[in-house]
Amino acid sequence: MDHVTNYQEVFEYANDIMVIHDKDTGEILQANRKACEMYGCSLEQLRRMTIGDLTRNLGPYNHAKGLMLVRKAATTAQGILFEWVVRDRAGHETSVEVSLKPITLDGVVRVIAIARDITERKQAEAALRQKERHYRRLIERSSDGIAILSAAGAVRFAGPSIQALLGVPPRFATGRSAFDFLSDEDAARFENILATLPPEADTVLTYRIRHRDGSWRVHEANCRNLTDDPAVSGILINFRDVTRRVQDEELARQRERQFSHIARLSTTGEMAAALAHELNQPFFAILNFVAGCRRQLQAGTYSTEGMLAALELAQKEAERAGKIVNTVRSFTCKGDYQRRAIDLRELVRGMEELIAVRARHACVALDFDLDAAPCWVECDEVLIQQVIVNLAVNGIESIEQTSTPGGRVRIAVRRDASGRVKLTLSDTGHGLPRVSPDKIFGAFFSTKRKGLGIGLSLCRSVVESHQGHMWMTASGGNEGERETRCHVLLPGCGAPAGQRPVNAKTAASAPRPRHWREPVATPAARG
């Protein structure tokens, strides 16, 4: 009897709705307190109600459908489970999950209905469906493409935006290898990167992919390895077409190269007088040596040793003139632009003769202070040489504008502890103008009367395109020597393959940097 009482209490005070029905008529025979609370009725009132009275009694939720389910459950040992809608006396409806099972009470088969409120679950499912519709509309309207690849590169899912990006519907790409659409070179690289991408890691790739019309497009993709995520189980690819951007960047680079070439020609043109004077000296010396040899040959007073000595001197003067011409030609030629690892000290030495020509013409001393160890940077040789020459010529012209005779330009190259390489060009000219530092590097700003104002602006653009930084400082004044310094800081790099690294012993035995070289001040130079 105690066991009966305990089961009765479990039934009465259960948190779920419990109702016992007649298996044939569906009549309500018993109900617990939770059922009475849900329907807002007493047990006696419930016993007088039909199944249809407990729901909206319309559509799929009506008396006939409910009675059919009760009768079906009576003959099914494992019972049946379904969703239903109940309505209380006030007309408020509640979604419930109902389990109907046959039970035997006092030797008679009945059907017990156990219902659980699933309102919150239904609301969550509705919110999830709404969110899914929201994201699906975003994916459909997005200009970016979305795809999920297997670890082997097969397309498991392709968003609808692939139609606009590649001209093919999603079903055309699904199931195929993504590498089939890429160029051979990019396919191999793409496959290798995805195969080595760790779980949860991401990377950005740029590749060429064929459009349905046969043209090659440039895409940029963000790839994230979500193979360990059960919701994705693949590699998520977000890609976009950057063909126009790449074309615009290439056009901008071409215009920058043209502008840079014009600037180099302009710099060389400004040095025309100095170059003419510098070439005049070796040519005049060659003329004298050759004329002297001719006179001795005509007079028959020559000696073999004397002739050889004169010809050797003429050859040296010709080589000197040729070096100047070659330096100018390499500086002004319109060659290909490409980046490679270069020792910045060698770039400075390569432009030494050209800068020295301008310095001697202006009676300016030129000083080099180069690091004993190599200073490797990955750069475009022509563009960085242009920066060196522009800054050096600016310093020389700044000294020319002062009333103080003489002056000095120093070019220093150093590698700091972090591996970065610093180029510093200092001069004792008129100093920095009293303007904002940003204005100094602005386009068309110049302190020269006939200056175009493109030199420093171009230099800064070149340096920043190499991920570098450029700035100016000043020191001295009043009683001390005034000095203006232009600093260029470039990221360092390792020595190229096959280049023997320089150790401390090698560096100690290497030729030391040259300091302070007096200018050749000839009367022609002063004129």
Image (cartoon, rainbow, N blue to C red):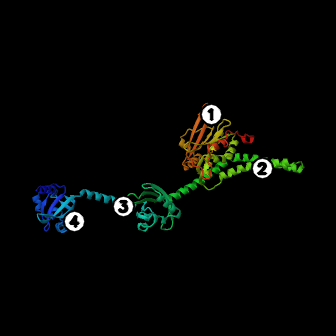
Q: Secondary structure at mark 4?
A: strand
Residue 329, relative to residue 173: is it above or below? above
Q: Secondary structure at mark 1?
A: strand
Q: Is residue 294 left or right of residue 5?
A: right
Q: CA distance from mark 4 to mark 3?
A: 35 Å
Circles 1 and 4: CB atoms closer than 8 Å: no
Choose mark 4 or mark 3, whichever is in front.
4
What is the number of the mark on residue 315? 2
Q: Which residue is mark 4?
A: 80
- Which residue type carries mark 3? Arg
Q: CA distance from mark 3 to mark 2?
A: 80 Å
Q: CA distance from mark 2 to mark 4?
A: 110 Å
- Which residue type carries mark 4? Ile
- Which residue type carries mark 1? Glu
Q: Which residue is mark 1?
A: 481
Q: Which residue is mark 3?
A: 136
Residue at 43% across, 59% down: 237
109 or 382: which is nearer to us? 109
| Residue lying farthest to the right in this orientation | 300
Q: Give the image quarter of residue 224.
A: bottom left
The image quadrant where one finds the N terminus is: bottom left
- Counting residues from the N terminus, which is met first, the one under dot 3 or under dot 2? 3
Choose mark 1 or mark 3, whichever is in front.
3
Residue 2's spot in the image, x, y percent?
A: 12, 55
- Which residue type carries mark 2? Gln
Choose mark 2 or mark 4, whichever is in front.
4
Residue at 31% across, 60% down: 129
Choose mark 2 or mark 1, whichever is in front.
2
Q: Secondary structure at mark 2?
A: helix
Question: Mark 3, residues whose alpha carbon is within 10 Å: few (<14), some, or many (≥20)?
Answer: some
For residue 397, say whether it is visible: no
Q: CA distance from mark 1 to mark 4?
A: 100 Å
